[in-house]
Image: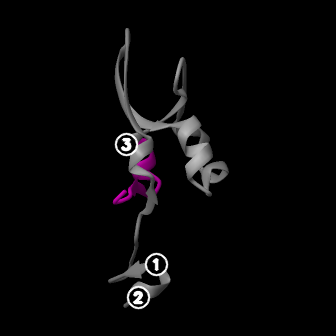
Amino acid sequence: RGDHRDGYRHGKRRKAALPRACRVYHHAEHGARYGYSGRCLRKHYAGYRGLPRRCAIVVGGQFGTIYRDKCLSGHGYGTGRR
């Protein structure tokens, strides 16, 4: 059993919390995308450089790069409380 103070709870690692303010919805001609704005994460998430590159999609415009929600979730990331 893990101790909740070291990032583990009941043998499972807690998801790394991404800033809720960086969550975006982008509508494109090939479908809608939910994810996290790369520009926002660069400013507000200290672990930005460690995010998996395979989750990134370049969309341009105000978001630049979006990190796909489902992909990040599969790599142990989730939305924080703020």
Query: Mark 1 or mark 2, which has the lower sequence index?
Result: 2
The residue that label 3 is drawn on is 70
Looking at the picture, which amino acid does disc 1 mark?
Gly
Q: Amino acid at mark 2?
A: Gly
Look at the picture and state if 78 lies above or below 68. Answer: below
Distance CA(mark 1)–CA(mark 2): 8 Å
Cα distance in 3D space between marks 3 and 2: 26 Å
Q: Is mark 1 in CB contact (under 8 Å) with mark 2? A: yes
Q: Secondary structure at mark 1?
A: loop
As drawn, the label of residue 2 is: 2
Residue appearing at x 67%, y 49% in the figure? 49
Q: Residue under circle 1?
A: 7
Q: Quadrant of residue 33?
A: top left
Q: Is residue 29 above or below residue 13?
A: above
Question: Dot 1: within a 10 Å radius of its alpha carbon, few (fewer than 14), some, or many (20 or more) residues?
Answer: few
Residues rendered magenta in the picture:
70-82
Single out the mark in the foreground, 1 or 3.
1
Identify the image quadrant of the N terminus.
bottom left
- Which quarter of the figure is the C terminus placed in? bottom left
Picture quadrant of residue 3: bottom left
- Secondary structure of the residue carrying tag 3 is helix
